[in-house]
Image (cartoon, rainbow, N blue to C red):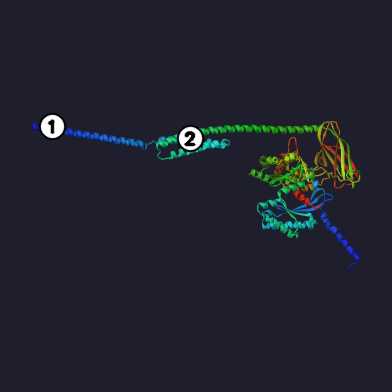
Amino acid sequence: MFPAYLKRFFCTALVLVQAVFVVPAQNSFKLKYDNSAIYAGIEVGAKGVKMSILEIGKNAQKTGAFNVLKDTSVNSDFITFSPASFQATLNAFSNLYTQAKKDYNISTESIFTVISSGVKSQAEKDNKNSWIKNLIDSFKSKVNEPLREVAVIDVLEEAKLSHLGIVPESRRYTTFLIDIGSGNTKGGFFPNGDTKMLKLFQLTWGTKSTANATEKRCEDDKTLDNYNKQLARVLTGAENSEIIYMVNESGAYPMSDYIAFSGGIAWSVATLISPELAGNTVIPVTYEDVLKFSERIYKNYPSLSDDAIVKSITEKTIDKVAIAKEVKRVNQVFDQKSLMAGTGLLLKIMRQFEGIYEKKQFFLVKNGQVGWISAYVDQHIVK
Amino acid sequence: MRDTKSLSLLLLSSVLFLLSIILLCTWGYQYYHQIQEDRTHSQVKNTNPTVPDSTRDSLLKIYQVTMRSLDNRLDTAWYYADSLKGNLDINLKEFYRLRDEIGSLLQVKSPNMADLDLARKKIGELQQRVTQLRYRNSDVESENAKLKALLEQMSKESQGIQDNSRQVEKENKSLTSKVNEFALLSAANLNLTAMANNDQEETNEAEQTEKLVGSFTVKSNITSKADIVIVVVQPDGQVLQKSAWESGSFETGNGKKIYSCKLHCETSKGEPKQLNFSLTADRYMKGKYMLQIYHNGILIGKVNKTLS
């Protein structure tokens, strides 16, 4: 029907159109590494479904070279185990999957789907394991992929994956990773020089629980001075009743040269202490740095506003707009009192590793939330 | 005449007889009465004697005073009785038992002598218990005071140790900073090289470069430990960082600066020491790379390398 040259012309045009519109859809991300690939990890968590689009460098396991390109979440509250939350979770799960596939043009082999430890432990507690199975089956049927793997991760595996995802290989057996969450703190280290066994570490104190306990002690006096006083009491109680014992019991002190902290408070403190390192995922700090910062939150909180921080940066090559945006985000997530509570808890844990003669090197990890999913993705990539 | 005499005699004897009978009856009655009285008396002795109220009241008073005197001290004894609680518990049980028994004895509306005797005896015992409890209480209090003093002493000592360690740490820091101020560290023979072909050959081509290798010698006027900060600025003005875990920022006279990596070294007085480092980037730009070496926030050396 068409002459041969016209066929060739249309084919070439089609390829060009694809090259212009489809391929850049994946490459519209600002990539950090050469020879990297883009993957998506979709995780059903206790509160909602989260999708992380990751750029994984060629030596991610060795250097920790992964970059978070996009981090999206949909609240669905799956662990209430109600028909409504089930439906909301299923919709979010399948929609994010479709989004990764169609909007970001990520192949199905590069999309990893998992159920987090938070869901698993709550389902076990409430005897609702069948809900997880139903969700997985419904998801597979909805996305029309009956052979798709949806792994269910337990606490130990998640802690192990977080360590593998965050800490580079060169420091794997000398780093104690501690994740300060809102309601608790967990982490661990590899004591035997291999990744077979992770010594798990847990505390019942988190940023929010510390802030709540302090608020409760404040009673009617809501002044900052009283908050600071009561916070010191709450933290001393937590230190004496739990932190000292748990750190000693973990046996991490003699086994670790580096102590890395992840979680929301680590991200906030890192962003505010070293705004000039906005592009870095890990920030080295000393105990004195964090102590000074803690005093600054209490005594000179206005100096932590985005305007004040941007003004303090002298380096000309730094992207001040990006820094201001990130600082603003921190200040939206944590107010002055929560920052004081979280930093106080961080300091109490750091103090356990502050010897007079032997000092450990501390790090604050900013992107800890995607650590485990990135390790999971990295482990499951067909290389 | 003779008949009248005998009649009078007969009359007299009859009167005497009658009198003697009356007398005998009176004696008999008296004797009988005496026996009856004796019997009643002995019966009364065996049954309830009448007890004056004053006796009961005085006993009740003693009991109440004993109770009152104990009440306050009992509370403090309970409060401080942590370590001696076992013994105190036994004594208190005994005390409560006695108190209840005495209470019930004294509550009886018409108590007999025996009950009151028993109550008196028990009050005596109660007073003894109270005295024992008082001693025990004072033992607890003195023990408590001793422990408190010991705790205070220990906390003072630990505070002293903490203060000392803080002081030592502070002094160490100030000494270190003083030493560092005097430590004049100089850097010489600075070199920044681009390596290609698995570190086998040197290159000036950005495209061929696989690694940047730097070397320099440091010399100090004293023996000390030092942190040397390496900054490699790329042609676009950005600092080339070794890795997120090895790079960071540091204070200089012109504010905070990002560093590529840090080297720790021990310097001997006057002896030069060679230090090396390497940096790997995903891609190398064409242009001028600037190596800067800092010590204590002060620039001690710099060199450039151009890649074409």
Q: Which residue is mark 2?
A: B126
Q: Kindly indicate whether the residues beneath marks 2 and 1 are on one polypeptide chain.
A: yes
- The amino acid sitting under disc 2 is Leu
Can you see residue A73? no
B79 shown above or below A104: above
The crowding category of the residue bearing disc 1, from other C-alpha atoms within 10 Å (few below 14, some 14 to 19, many at least 20), is few
Q: Which residue is mark 1?
A: B9
- The amino acid sitting under disc 1 is Leu
Q: Residue under mark 2: which chain is it in?
A: B
Q: CA distance from mark 2 to mark 1?
A: 84 Å
Residue B192 falls in image quadrant? top right
B89 displayed left or right of A223: left
B268 shown above or below A102: above
Q: Which mark is residue A109?
A: none
In what element is the residue under mark 1? Answer: helix
Query: Could you tell me which quadrant the N terminus of chain A lies in?
Result: bottom right
Residue A369 position in % (x across, y down): 74, 49
Viewer-nearest residue: A19 or A106: A106
- In this rendering, the count of numbered labels is 2
In what element is the residue under mark 2? Answer: helix
Viewer-nearest residue: B166 or B150: B150
A308 shown above or below A127: above
Residue B254 position in % (x across, y down): 82, 39
The earlier-in-sequence mark between 2 and 1 is: 1
